[in-house]
Amino acid sequence: MATHCGIIGLPNVGKSTIFNALTRAEAETANYPFCTVDPNTGIVPVPDERMDFLKTLYQPKKTTPSHMAFVDIAGLVAGASQGEGLGNQFLGHIREVDALVHIVRCFDDPEIVHVNGEVNPQNDVTLITTELILKDLETVEKRLLKSRKKIRSGDKAAAIEDSLLSRLQDALSNGVCARTLKISEKEAPLMHELTLLTQKPILYVGNVPEEDIEKGNAYSEALKQLADKEGAECLIISGKIESEIATLPPEEGAQFLEALGMKETGLARLIRASYKMLGLITFFTVGEDEVKGWTIGQNTPAVDAAGKIHSDIARGFIRAEVFHYDDLLTHHSAHAVKEKGLLRLEGKQYIVKDGDCIYFRFNV
C-alpha cells in the first residue's frame, strides 16, 4: 500500500495545479473556493537516479520504481474546525493521510482571488494551523474526560494516558502542534491511536511566480522563516512552470528546464522531500525480468521487507542475499561484487539499508 501525502492549503493557492503537474491526473482547477470537494489521489514514482543505472546494467523486461501517493484535499477556510466551508470533509481527509504538504501562495495576481483578500504566507499558515489545533484540542479534551473517569474508578494504567493528554492539552491550548511534543515509549501507542492532525509531519511549499523560481521572493522568505522556526522543511516551486513541463515530452521538458537554469523539476524535489520526511527508504530487487524499487520505513527488518513483496516470502523466509547498490556501481556486476566478498547472507532481523539489492530465499 502506497504512503499517502495530503496536499493542503487555502483555496486558490495552486494546490490542484501542482497536483495535476505532479500526477498528470487532470484534477479540476478553477478560480473559486472549494473547486476540489472529493480528494483526488495520484500514485507517482519516486525520482531515483539509481534506477537508471540498474536498468542500463540489467536490461530488464520491466522497470518499476518506488511509488508514493499524493492526495489533493479541498481548500480550508477559517472556522473549518467548527464545520465552516468544507471543514469536516477537509479535516477527515487529513486524518487519513500519513503526512502533509502545505502549499502556500507566494505570488500576486489580481485575477486570482485570495480567500482572505491579501497574500500573506504567515497569516495563511497560521489560519490552517489554528484550525488543525482546534480540532485536535477537541479530540484531546473529549479523551481527557474519559481518562479522568478511569482514574477516579481506580484504573492505575489511566495515569500514563492522563499525563500525555494533559501535556497535549497545554501545548495545543498555547498554539503548539502535537508533533513538537516529546513522548515516552509507553506513550507512543496512545499517541498513534489519537491520530491527531498536528502530529503529522509537514512540508511547506511556496508557490512562486516563474521569475522568482531561482531566488524566491519576500513571500517565500517569510514562509521559510516560519518553517525554520517550526523545524520543518520548506521548498519553493512554480506551479506555472511545473504545469508547463508536465505537458511536454521528456526531451522537450529537459530542454525547457535547461533554458530556465534548472537541473530538475521542483516536483522531483517535492517528492523526494516528502519521502525523506516520512522516514522512507528504497531497497531493490534486480534481475533480467524486472528491476524494482520497494518502499519501506527506516529500521525495517529483512523479514518485514520480504513481506512487502509477498506474505509467503515473509512466512517462509530462509535468508536474504544482500549487496549494496554502491558496490554494484563500483564493480559493475553482481558477479564482481560476489567475487569481492561483498555479497552477504542475512537473517530475518537484519535491518535493511537504503540502496540494498536483495534476493530473498524462502520455502512454503
Image: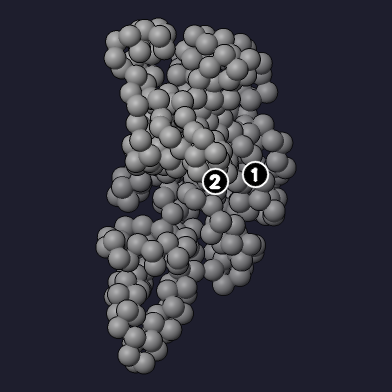
- Image quarter hosting the N terminus: top right
Q: Label for residue 310?
A: none
Q: Residue furthest front?
A: 364
Q: Residue furthest bottom?
A: 153
- Please, what secondary structure does the residue beneath circle 2 have? strand
* Residues packed near mark 1 inside 10 Å, few (<14), some (14 to 19) or many (20 plus): some
Could you tell me residue 338's position as x and y percent? 35, 13
Q: Is residue 79 left or right of residue 215?
A: right
- Image quarter hosting the C terminus: top right
Residue at left offset 42%, top offset 62%: 192
Residue at left offset 46%, top offset 25%: 359
Could you tell me residue 347's position as x and y percent? 35, 35
Could you tell me residue 172's position as x and y percent? 37, 68
Residue at left offset 35%, top offset 12%: 337
Amino acid type at mark 2: His
Q: Earlier in the sequence, mark 1 or mark 2?
A: 2
Front-most of residues 332 and 197: 332
- Please, what secondary structure does the residue beneath circle 1 have? strand
Could you tell me residue 257's position as x and y percent? 53, 16
Amino acid type at mark 1: Thr
For residue 156, which quarter of the picture?
A: bottom left
Front-most of residues 117 and 199: 199
Residue bearing mark 1: 41
Residue bearing mark 2: 4
**In the displayed structure, would residue 13 be above or below residue 84?**
above
Contact (CB < 8 A) between labels 1 and 2? yes
Q: How many marks?
A: 2
Distance of label 1 from label 2 (alpha carbons): 9 Å
